[in-house]
């Protein structure tokens, strides 16, 4: 046997480096940035709020992670977890809407595309709604509208600020008009919240589209967006085909909307909790202290 044959046989008998590395790396230990392609240790990414350490790309996160990022430990109190969707229109395309709901509920362990509750953000009590894109693209159906309306009403009664993290493809077509009416219902609850002098801040994440953008996403006292999030109503291709012209490359991005006055600020995820805490503190009503007039002073002296 030649020396070449000996090395060739040895290489065949040994597992290749790729197979060995796949066995050694546990699932979920590493994450790949979809923007720059760099591999990062998932634990390091989580400590950086799932923002790429190399290019600052904001990796999509879902409702559980959002709640963990914004709400202080051991202060989250979910509400209306029992509210579940139904199939009032008996909608069916390739499969029934009821079957699709069950599939997504099994996959995500959520009842629908939003989680709501009361919690503390940097020690400040708030009402929070977090939409979840992993459940049917975060589409807004009757349950999403009902749960968001209820958390707004709860916050109004308790005189708390409301924060809603938006992530949605728009209204849920399987519920037809029942989905579209949620736009007005949530907007009405927000107007009552505003009349009571309470703060509302929507956070627009990638993507925020359709009926969500056309209603509560744009009704905030202060509207915040994450960097490079896609925000709009109709899709880019639909608009281009309608107008018969090419749109700017950055059209429907957070940066474009900020430049044209549709949003108030772009806040990186790593600064979001701190920024929200500052805004809430700035907008808290000042304590009313009655002015004290010494008993010996006459009315003329007070006026003078």
Image: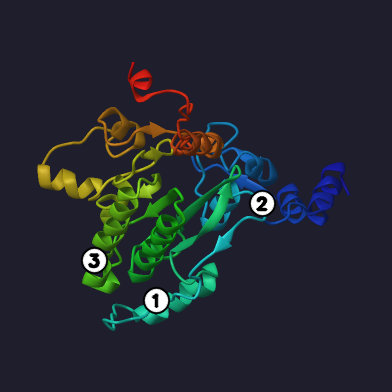
Q: Given this view, does label 2 or label 1 mark the residue nearer the observer?
A: 2
x and y percent of residue 57 in the render? 50, 37
Q: Does residue 138 appear to the left or right of 277 in the view shown? A: left
Residue 78 sits in which quadrant? bottom right
Which is nearer the N-term, disc 3 or disc 1? 1
Q: CA distance from mark 2 to mark 3?
A: 35 Å
Residue to which mark 1 is pinned: 85
* Element class at badge 1: loop
* Element class at badge 2: loop
Q: Does residue 270 appear to the left or right of 264 in the view shown? A: right
Residue to which mark 2 is pinned: 73
Q: Residue furthest top?
A: 304
Residue to which mark 3 is pinned: 181
User: Image point 50% across, 40% down: which residue?
Assistant: 58
> Badge 1: few (under 14), some or many (20 or more) residues near its Cα, within 10 Å?
some
Any part of residue 268 in sight: no
> Badge 2: few (under 14), some or many (20 or more) residues near its Cα, within 10 Å?
few
x and y percent of residue 174 in the render? 29, 73
Q: Does residue 264 appear to the left or right of 54 in the view shown? A: left
x and y percent of residue 285 in the render? 44, 38
Which is nearer the N-term, disc 2 or disc 3? 2
In the rendered view of the protein, which quadrant contains the C terminus? top left
* Element class at badge 3: helix
| Foreground residue among 154 and 106 | 154
């Amino acid at each position: 046997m030649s020396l070449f044959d000996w090395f060739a046989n040895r290489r065949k008998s040994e597992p290749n480096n790729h197979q060995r590395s796949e066995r050694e790396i546990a699932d979920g230990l590493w994450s790949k940035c979809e923007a720059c392609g760099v591999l990062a240790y998932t634990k390091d990414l989580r400590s950086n709020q799932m923002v790429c350490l190399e290019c600052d790309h904001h990796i999509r996160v879902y409702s559980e992670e959002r709640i963990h990022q914004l709400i202080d430990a051991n202060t989250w109190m979910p509400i209306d977890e029992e509210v579940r969707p139904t199939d009032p229109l008996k909608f069916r395309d390739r499969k029934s809407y009821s079957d699709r709901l069950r599939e997504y509920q099994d996959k995500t362990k959520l009842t629908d595309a939003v989680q709501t509750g009361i919690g503390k953000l940097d020690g400040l009590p708030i009402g929070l709604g977090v939409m979840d894109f992993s459940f049917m693209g975060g589409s807004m159906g009757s349950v999403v509208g009902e749960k968001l309306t209820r958390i707004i009403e709860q916050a109004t009664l308790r005189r708390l600020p409301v924060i809603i993290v938006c992530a949605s493809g728009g209204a849920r077509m399987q519920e037809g008009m029942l989905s579209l009416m949620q736009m007005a219902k949530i907007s009405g609850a927000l107007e009552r919240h505003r009349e009571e002098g309470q703060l509302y801040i929507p956070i627009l994440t990638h993507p925020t589209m359709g009926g969500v953008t056309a209603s509560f996403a744009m009704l905030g006292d202060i509207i915040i967006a994450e960097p490079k999030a896609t925000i709009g109503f109709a899709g880019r291709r639909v608009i281009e085909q309608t107008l018969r012209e090419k749109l700017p490359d950055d059209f429907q991005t957070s940066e474009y909307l900020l430049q044209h006055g549709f949003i108030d600020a772009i806040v990186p995820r790593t600064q979001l909790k701190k920024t929200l805490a500052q805004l809430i503190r700035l907008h808290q009503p000042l304590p009313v202290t009655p002015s004290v007039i010494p008993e010996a002073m006459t009315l003329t002296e007070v006026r003078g």
